[in-house]
Every structure is written in C-alpha cells, then in structure tokens.
Amino acid sequence: MRTKSIRPKKINVVTLGCSKNIYDSEVLSGQLKANGKEVVHEGQGEVVVINTCGFIANAKQESIDTILHFVDQKNQGAVEKVYVTGCLSERYKEDLEKEIPDVDQYFGTRNLPELLKTLGADYKHELVGERLNSTPKHFAYLKISEGCDRPCSFCAIPLMRGSHRSTPIEDLVTEAEALAAKGVKELILIAQDLTFYGLDLYKERALARLLKALVKVDGIEWIRLHYAFPTGFPEDVLEVIANEPKVCNYIDIPLQHIADPVLKSMRRGTTKAKTDELLRKFRASVPGMAIRTTLIVGYPGETEEDFEILKNWVKETRFERLGCFTYSHEENTHAYQLDDDVPEEIKEQRAAEIMEIQGQISWELNQRYVGGVYRCLVDRVEDGFFVARTEFDSPEVDNEVLVDAKKHYLRVGDFVDLKIVEAADFDLYAEPVDSSI
C-alpha cells in the first residue's frame, strides 16, 4: 500500500457521456485551477472525480463500472479519494450511496459549489467563460443552456438536469472570446435543445441573435449547431446559416422516429407530415446543408409496420449523417408506464438494418465529393493518417477526411484545402491542393 504524501493532491477528472458532460468537467477543472489546484483530465491523480452519465442503460453501466474501478483503486491504495458527480449521481444518489458506499461523496449536476468546497476550493463567480479545455485546442463545446422543458416520454434528462435555463448572450460572447484567445477556431454549440434558447431570458427564441453575436468574435472560423429540437424550430436560424460564412452548413436535429403512432406516444409534438415539411425548408433555405439526425428503434409498441415506415423514410430522405440507438426503458419517465414489449434482439436487428441502409446512402452521397476541393480542419494524426473534417462533419460522430501522413505533412489545428480522391461509406481520402505540403 502506498504511503500517503503531504504534498498537494493532484485531482484527476474523469468524464463519461456526452459533450455536455465534457463541458461541465472543463468548467470544474477551470475552477480548480483558478484555486491553485493541480488538475488533469483522465490522467493520474491521488483524488478522482468521476463525472457520470445516466442517460440510457449502456451509459449507466459504463458509469457504474468506472466507479467500481476507482473504488478498487482506492481500496488498493492507488488513489486516496473518489468523488462522483454528474447525471447518474443526480438521478440515483441514494441508491449509489447504499450500493457503493466506499465512494467518499456523491454530488448532483447542480452541486458544483459543494463539490469544489469538498475539494478545498471556492466557487469563483467571476470566472465567466474560464475553462480548462480537454478537447483538442482548435475546437471547443459551448453550452448555451442547461436543462430541458420538453415532455419527451422516453427521456430522463429533465430529471437529471432540471428545467431549461439559458445563458445570457453577453456571457456566451465573453466565453467565446476567451476560447478564441486560447486558439479555438471552431465552436460547437450544445444544449439539450438549442432551439429553445432565449425563451426564458428574452421571451422569444434567440438562437439567431446569439449566432449573429458569435460570428463577430475574432479567431472563431466555424460555428456548428448540435441538438436542435424539430417542434417550433425558429426558421430565422436557417437564414443565418445561409448568409453567415462562419456558421457551418450543418445541423444536428434528433428526430427519433417518423411513424405517427410512435411520435404521438413519444410526445414529440409533431407528425411525419410536419417533419417532412421542415426538412424541405432546411434543404430549400440552405442548399447543400448536411443534416444529421438520430433515431430510436424498439420503442414500446413499435410494430413491424411502424418500423417499415421508418426504414422507407430513411431511404427516401437520404440524411447526410445518421445514428441509430435502441430504446432504453428508463425509470420515472412517461414511457416507463408502457410495456417494453420489443425484444432486445429485435431492437438490435432493427438498429442494424437502419445503419446498413444509412451506410449505403452515405457511400452514395460521398461519391459526389470525389474530385472536389474542400476547406478542412485537421484534428489529429492516427494510424498513419492526418484526420481532418469538412464543415459538414462534427468530431467523433461524422465522416473523416484522411490524408496519408507518409506522403504529406499537415499541422493539427490548421485549415487546409484538400482534394478528395476517393470516398468510402464514412471516410473520404484526400490530398492537399498545395503540392508543396
């Protein structure tokens, strides 16, 4: 067993789940650093803070496994303290305290000041926009609001994150300016629902206003929109996307399903006809826009007919980017009252069918890139390739542009013009236009 040191303890922040959790961990780390604490992200430290996800079954299991791993490390003397925060802890604190009592303390999603105090730090209100970035230095997530007021039947986010609360535009601009000063070139706007932004503060949907303010920030070259809700979509946002070069021709709009009986049970507040009309407006207003969506299969009561409607719609709509998930039966949600009647193997089979369809669509759409030149942002070097992205792709989830690192040298974080020479289903292969590179 290791002898405990009297030197200041290094704090290791471990992040699980979505980009909103990444953002929260960066804020926590920034606060700790401002208090003179030594902090690392997913490194080595005597004190471990685990920022958990509690959204669906797989994410919950990953969070529990991670907690158990670090508790075991603590019991072996490899770490001294283990603290747990985030969505899983917010939702299941009492259960976790009983089941895994060796954790030193549990905190919810809204307990940052208390967590900091436990770590020997003060919450500094003046640190607007101050974060310790854990993403590559050239892009960062910008969380524009917290919580959600939508009534979706399957979603536990309001239980874990509370009601919708927008961050004022001036604070977000300040944060964007601070990020740009650190070398950030791409802002990825995130929230539980971007399109609800501003209703609480300004009594109107203000996403377009926010975008017009953010494009004025020097150093920011791309602004990308994630997690837009379809019902009540503010169409003035489309005008900004079309007319502001810094706003990427890209939107992530999780539609979840398209069969009307399923949409009604999901409490999505829309229909197939309304959704199709909205997508027509997207493509008419912003020609060439990449639309990303996510779908849920195996929702309670989803019939073969419902699934066939979904499959045919995916074939007809030809989304540029698409992900598919199996339904997870979550306690205390409205859908938990329903019988989770689609067997797990059928859920998995349906998800695989959707992704097989999408793989073919993506391959066909990607062929149009071949021979074209695109401005790309270089993210990293991996497996002998420089990995870059077009404006139509978000990190981690979308297509990547690969450049042979044996033949060419690119700098991570730079924008570079690349000519696409070959296209697969989810990868594009390219060469620099500048032959000297």
Image (cartoon, rainbow, N blue to C red):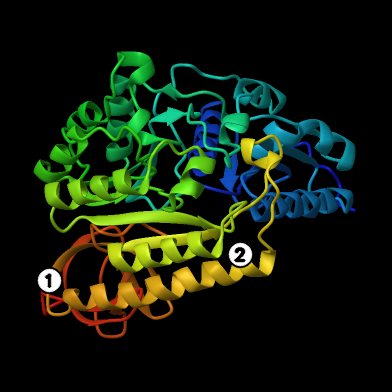
Image position, residue 91 (x, y; %): 70, 34
Tally of numbered discs: 2
Please state which of residues 63 and 126 is positioned toward the viewer in this rendering.
Answer: 63
List the residue tagged with mark 1: 373
Image position, residue 348 (x, y; %): 60, 68
Please state which of residues 187 and 153 is positioned toward the viewer in this rendering.
Answer: 153
Decide if residue 275 is on the left or right side of residue 345.
Answer: left
Upstream in sequence: badge 2 or badge 1: 2
Decide if residue 23 is on the left or right side of residue 370.
Answer: right
Image position, residue 40 (x, y; %): 58, 46
- Residue type indicated by callout 2: Lys
List the residue tagged with mark 2: 347
Decide if residue 218 is on the left or right side of residue 34.
Answer: left
The residue drawn where x is 69% and y is 56% is 341
Element type at marker 2?
A: helix
Q: Mark 2 or 1, which is nearer the eye?
A: 2
Image position, residue 96 (x, y; %): 81, 38
